[in-house]
Image: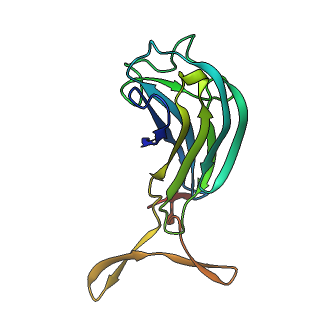
Amino acid sequence: MGLIQGTVSQNADRNRSFIYWQEISVDTENNRSLVRVIPIIDTLTPAYDWNGTASGMTITINGTPYSYGNFNSNTDSGWTYSLGDSPTGRVAENIIEQLSPAYKEVYVDHNEDGSKDCSISMSFSLPSAGFGPGNVSASGTATLTLIPRGILHTKVSGIWKQGLTYVKVSGVWKQAIGVYTKVSGVWKQSI
């Protein structure tokens, strides 16, 4: 979970923009993570409401853009997050709250070594007759959970050493994701 702060072109004295991202799950077997992204505007002064059209909304995750077109966004009926549950620590609005789902979730493949730094960005415009945040953008990187690789312990000259395990798949050597051993007739992942 993390926040990537961006910029707003209107009311910057009270509004800030963020990408709120969460790693929902880690799929070790398929070497990937499920990532959720929510575009957020927070404020110091929730008395300043907006009700207008968000246009050109695009969220890009790991290089793939997802466009939302134009839709209504307003805080007249209240803000998504209160001070007590806001990821930013201030009253905040999920800009795509009125859409279904109110977030973007995608699987992101990890690198062969199990690591992954995932690029995330967003941009849209929400002027709302001067009350909204105006042109909004944010971009940054989310570091995902390292998916462990199989580690093999081998005794060399009387000393136990550990190393990575590689297997040949279709003529290509690949790093193993896990090491399995048979215990009482049942295969169990040992690493």
The front one of 177 and 191 is 177
The front one of 170 and 96 is 96
Is 52 situated above or below 184? above
Drawn side of residue 161 relative to residue 175, left or right: left
Is 161 situated above or below 177? below
Quadrant of the rendering where the N terminus is positioned: top left
Which quadrant holds residue 157? Answer: bottom left
Q: Residue furthest front?
A: 130
Is 54 situated above or below 165? above
Residue 95 seen anywhere in this rendered image of the structure: yes
Q: Residue at x 53, y 55 (%)?
A: 119
The front one of 99 and 170 is 99
Q: In this figure, what is the number of numbered marks?
A: 0
Drawn side of residue 137 relative to residue 157, left or right: right
Q: Residue furthest bottom?
A: 157
* Residue 167 percent coordinates (x, y): 57, 77
* Residue 108 percent coordinates (x, y): 59, 53
Q: Residue furthest right?
A: 69
The front one of 43 and 149 is 43
